[in-house]
Image (cartoon, rainbow, N blue to C red):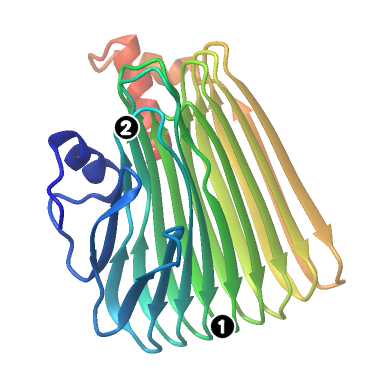
Amino acid sequence: MKKLDEIQKRLLLEVAGLHEVPEGAYNIRSNGESAGRVSTANIEIVPKEGGSGLDITIRPGTKNESVHIPVVMTKSGLKELVYNDFHIGEDADVVIVAGCGIDNCGPQDSEHDGIHRFYVGKGARIRYVEKHYGSGDGKGKRILNPGTEVYMEEDSTMEMEMVQIKGVDDTNRSTIAELKKGAKLVVRERLMTHGVQNALSTYEVKLDGEGCSADVVSRSVARDDSYQKFDAKLLGNAPCKGHTECDSIIMDRGRILAVPALEANHVDAALVHEAAIGKIAGEQIIKLMTLGLTEQEAEEQIINGFLK
């Protein structure tokens, strides 16, 4: 693997929890190029022609293995669009860790747009973790636009953890999913914006198979003058269960728009949506201050617990 500098190592730790080269299959992308790639007997990573992304194939029955595909960017003005396709065999049970970290200390905008498509085989179980992080004191923006497509075969399960806590100036997060009979999708999104940052999260989940289910929950905090929009739509096209929830804290001059939408196209489609936006309760802050915390420390404790 190519040697990474200290900033790149710090970004890898933030978005993928990596102190060193991971075990198992991985592809680490740095400033538009592969910094290292390893396949295993059960997981093959192959670059697409033209260098526009990767094809990751996980053999049927693969158990207790992982794939890491983090991206780090430290060059101001760099913009890229990458397509990664995951072909997951029947009855596989693996963890996939993605995410992108941008450190921009220059005057130009830096942008990474990553499109991830998951083809989840019958009975497979996938845990997918995607974290986004920005840093750097340059005037150029840190822009991340992830697109996720999930196509789930019968009785498959996918758990998605989508996290963006710090430093991303603009993001447009788009997720679509199509579920067949007995498939189960669970999404947990955690998001915080500050300054004048903007964040748009859009979900469209089609519940096409009998007995399939989806649970999409977003927790977010909007601070300073930032803006967030959560737009989630569940389409019940069969006997199914669906739940979507947006729970948000608004602070300072932040703005939040929650747009939950349900479309039932079958008499046995059971769909529920919930949305709540509010400020931190004063009694919560007072209670923590009686334990010796300052008001600012109390706020941070409440926010950290909320986003955990």
Image position of 174 (left or right of 65):
right
Q: What element carries label 1?
A: loop
Image position of 227 (left or right of 64):
right
How far is the residue under mark 1 from the one under mark 2?
A: 43 Å
**From the image, which quarter does the N terminus lie in?**
bottom left
Residue at point 15%, 44% (across, down): 4
Dot 1 or dot 2, earlier in sequence: 2
Q: How many labels does the image show?
A: 2
Q: Where is residue 183 in the image (x, y as percent from the top left)?
A: 59, 76
Q: Which kind of residue does numbered mark 1 sit on?
A: Asp
- 172 versus 297 height, above or below: below
Q: Compare residues 56 and 20 and report the one nearer the observer.
A: 56
Q: What element carries label 2?
A: loop
Q: Where is residue 151 in the image (x, y as percent from the top left)?
A: 60, 72
Q: Give the foreground label among 1 and 2.
A: 2
The quarter of the displayed image where residue 43 is located: bottom left
Local crowd at mark 2 within 10 Å, few (<14), some, or many (≥20)?
some
The quarter of the displayed image where residue 256 is located: top right
Q: Where is residue 146 in the image (x, y as percent from the top left)?
A: 52, 47
Local crowd at mark 1 within 10 Å, few (<14), some, or many (≥20)?
many
Q: Compare residues 299 and 168 and report the one nearer the observer.
A: 168
For residue 75, which numbered disc appears in the image?
2
Q: Where is residue 285 in the image (x, y as percent from the top left)?
A: 40, 17
Q: Name the residue under label 1.
A: 155
**From the image, which quarter does the C terminus lie in?**
top left
Residue at point 24%, 45% (across, down): 12
